[in-house]
Amino acid sequence: MKTVTITEQPKIDEVIRSCQFCFVAVADVDATPYVFPMNFGYQDGILYLHSGPQGRKTDILEKNPKVCISFCANASLYYTAEQIACTYLMQTKSVIIDGQVEFIADDAEKIRIMNIIMAHYTAKTDFQYSAPAIKNVRVWKIQPTQVSCRFLGVPHLEAIKLEKAQHNK
């Protein structure tokens, strides 16, 4: 089994879109790490999140807007010999995004982004939002500065095909 680094954007997008949530890592000014799960929306290579107007997350991000976001899809346990622990591994697909949070202030833009987030979980893109709901939500926009994608536990022959396909592009 191999780990394959994926560089093709459509495959990266597919991994992100297959996830129901992501893990967001931030660091306070004293470098204390804080990781939390969040739901999200993703469109045109930009990641969108939302939260309440106040709290630990937003307090940290006001001081240090840098984030690292992790997605993990299709995780399954694999082994070649049931009685030998060293043959066990997790087959999975992962994406790590580094970026900076930009908080969105414009109400119309908040509504547009909230519909992107809702579209990730439903078939609808035209939800209605009350003025107080939009006023009291923090909408986050993250333009990735770095993206890495890896498929872990790929059978050797499949890994060779994946690597060859990426080099031919």
Image (cartoon, grey):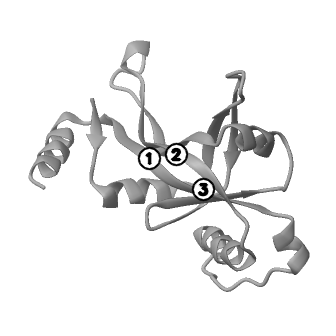
Is 169 drawn above or below residue 151 in the view shown?
Answer: below
Horizontal side of residue 139 vs 88, given as left or right: right
Mark 2: give few (<14), some (14-19) or many (20+) Cα within 10 Å.
Answer: some
Secondary element at tag 1: strand
Q: Which residue is mark 1?
A: 145
Q: In the rendered image, which quarter is residue 141 located in? A: bottom right
- Under mark 1, the amino acid is Thr
Residue under the point 35% across and 39% down: 150
Residue 17 appears in the rendering: yes
Q: Are marks 1 and 2 in contact (CB under 8 Å)?
A: yes
What percent of the width, then of the height, locates residue 56? 82, 39
Is 73 drawn above or below residue 124 in the view shown?
Answer: above
What percent of the width, then of the height, locates residue 128? 77, 84
Which labelled disc corresponds to residue 99? Answer: 2
Which labelled disc corresponds to residue 37? Answer: none
Which labelled disc corresponds to residue 20? Answer: 3
- Under mark 2, the amino acid is Gly
